[in-house]
Image (cartoon, rainbow, N blue to C red):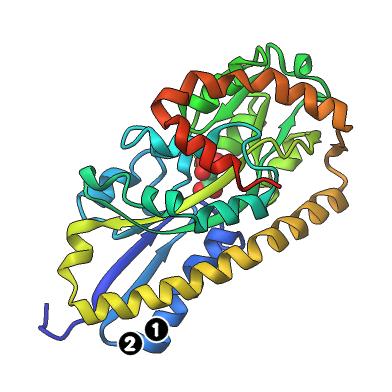
Amino acid sequence: MAADAPIVIKFAHVVADDTPKGKGALLLKKLVEERMAGKIKVEVYPNSTLVGDAEEMQALFDNKVQLLAPSMSKFAPYTKKLQLFDLPFLFDDAEALQRFQKREAARELLRSMAAHGVYGLAYWNNGLKQLSATTALRKPIDASGLAFRIQPSPVLESQFAAVGAKPVVLPFAKVYESLKGGVVQGAENPWSNILSQNMHSVQPYITESNHGVLDYMLITNNDFWLSMPFAVRSELEGIILEVTQAVNREAAAVNRRDRERILASGSSQLITLTPEERQAWREQMLPVWKTYEAEIGADLIRAAMTVNR
Ligand code: LMR
């Protein structure tokens, strides 16, 4: 490679371009092209085209990719602390999550995988998760006996076990075909992921449960990051801050838009829960917190709870 060739940063992710994360990745590429041409080149690989969610961390360790933004649910092998974000009904809404991310406790979590050489750069939000299924889910008992696709997270496994459902870990790229083929009958996703993977076409019922968050950490490989000259790194970090603000400002609007598109498609019936019905799901799932309190840390859970109003 010529001495003055730009440093290539491969940014792989598993979702579509027109989602909060997909848009963030493309904005990052665009701003780097505009401001750091010749120094840095960002290549974006969406939709698991370079690596899927089961291989992406290894690819980061092997320096085959340099940027990822996996959901918090995929970090359990590297730290137990980030399981915090999977606790059902922890954050009242997306704004509460955003408030938490600005707190010291959350800033410290960006370093929670340092022992594995993972450097956390930022939090990127998607949205609140909704339950979808082949049958109507109004009460927790309605989920009993159904198989739900989950991300590889022990907390999410416990969450579905708490309502008598069968959690099945599947990579994101397999969700649509597994729902369509009947391997699983249900799933939990924010509106943007339901729409962009066409899941609504095979899920006739969507319960607006808002029972958890789908949130990402933008991460890099520590050795790779430190191998870049300080000035280059600083400029890149400035761009990342700008992109992070844009992603987190627009994530809710993208999800609102996609919710409307799904409803307009007429493919799925929306189930709106009364406060009492939502409370029933909450009560059934809340014991999960106790199971993971020691691993996550009671202080951290308390710190997160203070952001709800
Ligand atoms: C999932 O696997 O459901 C999500 O983590 C996908 C994503 O990156 O939004």
Horizontal and vertical percent for residue 236?
34, 76
> Callout 1: few (<14), some (14-19), or many (20+) C-alpha neighbours within 10 Å?
some
| SS for callout 2 | loop
Q: Amino acid at mark 2?
A: Ala
Q: Are marks 2 and 1 in contact (CB under 8 Å)?
A: yes
| SS for callout 1 | helix
In the rendered image, is residue 5 in sight? Answer: yes
Q: Residue under circle 1? A: 33
Question: Which residue shows up at 56% across the image and 21% down it?
Answer: 288
Question: Which residue shows up at 74% across the image and 24% down it?
Answer: 281
Horizontal and vertical percent for residue 271?
86, 34
Q: Quadrant of residue 179?
A: top right
Tell me the distance, in whole angstroms, between the alpha carbons under discs 2 and 1: 5 Å
Horizontal side, residue 203 vs residue 154: left or right: right
Question: Which residue shows up at 66% across the image and 55% down it?
Answer: 95
Q: Residue under circle 2? A: 37
